[in-house]
Image: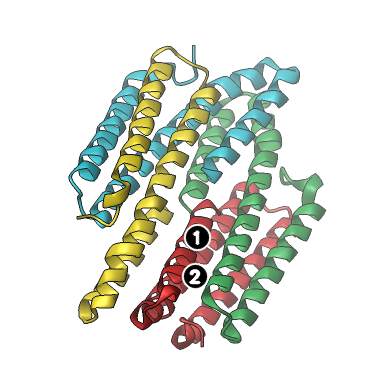
Chain colours: A yellow, B cyan, C green, D red
């Protein structure tokens, strides 16, 4: 089970809302909506995605990483290094 | 017509690809895909959205803002201020 | 004269404050300040720098780009393309 | 001792380089350097700061958080929550 297992419903609701924002963006582009209004919607969708990322990361640290460390051994270091790399990718996205 | 009018097909293709990424994310969450793999997909979708934003902004500056300035008058200053605010929103997203 | 010429005093004040934040960070690291407190200061300095960037960009659009467009010719397109590239660099920083 | 204790020399070197970049920015502004060149330097300094942040965060997870979890008890959850909040601040910076 993934670290976010208990939050799946909430995460899926948020992702469906982001999907709705992206489809809304397609309609905006298709109907030549003013650039700035379209950009505002892109900013909102990006913010919603970043918020999903923070939720996933928080669950990952609180479950997968915490379990690996509590279990001890070399797995713990590997999990921490892997989480750091994911954080780096998010900050550069 | 919006500043991006001539690039609509390309923008719509990109937005449909982002929509596919978001739907892929829903499947990943639904099937308890490992947090880090899910996060990597969130980073990819965020990057794709940021790239759409840069495209929209570039078209806006090259058409709407440029036309307003070439037309002269107070509209020019308003368009520049509006573009600056949109850039600030994107950087804070 | 740069686009931000009239705002130089304000920009220099802000940059001196960022310099103070960076020197404060060196003291924090030197005295083994708790990681999270040090990170909070890094976030504050980054935010302050991003705000300087937005100020510079706004002045650039309002003066250099606007003047180039009002002057007409091929310089206008070049200035808009150059500004778009600078915005892309800031968003990826 | 902070989580980054063993990397202090490297972190201090990086922070002194960022300080040099900020002082360079002050000279650029003071001498009316072209906005885009100044902005490029702001992007470079921001990137350098983000890289310091990632280093601090990685050390924090690998030492402070890992030690708290290995030690068990309620401290572990608190440390994970605190790290998540710091990551959120960095992503919104």
Please state the horizontal and vertical placement of residue B76, each as a whole percent of the image: 69, 22
Q: Is residue A22 above or below residue D36?
A: above
- Residue A57 quadrant: bottom left
Question: Quick one: SS at disc 2?
Answer: helix
Q: Quadrant of the C terminus of chain D?
A: bottom right
Please state if A49 lies on the left or on the right of C76 as rendered.
left
Please state the horizontal and vertical placement of residue B31, each as a whole percent of the image: 17, 45
Residue shown at 42%/12% (left/top)? A31
Q: Is residue A74 above or below residue C59?
A: below
Please state if C29 lies on the left or on the right of D70 as rendered.
right
Question: Quick one: SS at disc 1?
Answer: helix
**Residue corresponding to mark 1:** D85
Chain letter of the residue beneath label 1 in the structure image = D
Viewer can see residue A93: no
Query: Are labels 1 and 2 on one chain?
Result: yes
Front-most of residues D9 and D71: D71
Front-most of residues D31 and D79: D79
**Residue corresponding to mark 2:** D52
Residue shown at 38%/33% (left/top)? A18
């Amino acid at each position: 089970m993934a670290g976010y297992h208990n939050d799946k419903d909430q995460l899926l609701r948020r992702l469906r809302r982001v999907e709705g924002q992206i489809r809304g963006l397609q309609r905006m582009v298709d109907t030549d909506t003013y650039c700035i209004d379209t950009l505002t919607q892109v900013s909102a969708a990006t913010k919603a995605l970043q918020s999903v990322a923070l939720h996933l990361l928080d669950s990952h640290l609180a479950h997968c990483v915490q379990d690996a460390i509590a279990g001890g051994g070399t797995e713990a270091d590997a999990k921490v290094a892997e989480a750091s790399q994911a954080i780096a990718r998010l900050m550069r996205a």
